[in-house]
Image (cartoon, grey):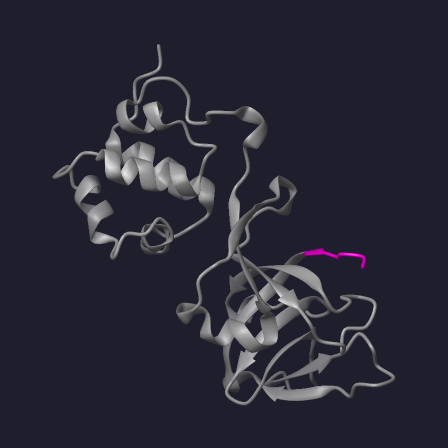
Amino acid sequence: MREKQNNWQRIEAVIKWANMSTNYFARHIGLARGENLYQIKRGNNGISRDVAQRIVAKFPQIDKLWLLTGDGQMFAEQQLRGAQIPFYNVDVELGIANLQHLEPESDLVVPQMGACDLAMIYSGRAMGQAIPAGTVVFLKNVERDEIIPGEEYVIISRKIVTLRIVRTAESGKRLRLVAGDKENYDDIMLNVNDIMAVYKVKGKLIINT
């Protein structure tokens, strides 16, 4: 018989499944700070009904009885399994630099999407048919040195925020940001050191209107 997970192991299982950091998870479920969860990790507190309810309200897939007691299974309904991706109903090029001031409108469950941090609307025209205006883009925050030339990224720099195909320039110290619609949009040359954050486009939901 498998041994029951302790309080923190159950919380940790949900955090890992949701693909969030502990602090982000705490904010996502409406806790003012991650310290509430760290007290559970240290063994100072159990999982209160309030914390359990907050988690289940955000993640209805999670079984509340399992969360409180360890009895049963983690998922209440197997068909709902899949991480919830926070969806911000704002234009990615306008909103992502101010993400800490935004609240997600809802959560999207797309099991096939894999590890994503958030989803936003792309309202631009530069990507042409590759990413039409109105597409929901699923994004993962990555380091600058993780950029793969030829892939699509949202680049946040000191001067611009843009979604483009990223290619390396000759020197290696600059990037060439290429539009999908090359006929109407020029390449953008950007110093690597000016980049403040990078989000890889992990998936696209193109909505036909």
State the quadrant of the N terminus.
top left
State the quadrant of the C terminus.
bottom right
Where residue 152 sits, quadrant-wise, is bottom right
User: Residue farthest to the left?
Assistant: 44
Residue 140 on image: x %, y %: 55, 59
Drawn side of residue 164 relative to residue 59, left or right: right
Residue 179 on image: x %, y %: 76, 78
Against 175, is 78 above or below?
above
Give the residue displayed 54% in from the left and 78% down from the top.
156
User: Residue farthest to the right?
Assistant: 183
Residue 196 on image: x %, y %: 48, 79
Where residue 58 sits, quadrant-wise, is top left
Residue 68 on image: x %, y %: 28, 27
What segment is highlighted magenta in the picture? 204-209
Give the residue displayed 44% in from the left and 67% down from the top.
102
Q: Nearer the viewer, residue 107 or 19?
A: 107
Q: Nearer the viewer, residue 149 or 104?
A: 104
Q: Name the magenta segment's main secondary structure.
A: loop
Drawn side of residue 133 relative to residue 192, left or right: right
Give the residue displayed 35% in from the left and 28% down from the top.
64
Against 4, is 93 above or below?
below
User: Is 207 included in the stretch rendered in magenta?
Assistant: yes
Drawn side of residue 106 relative to residue 113, left or right: left
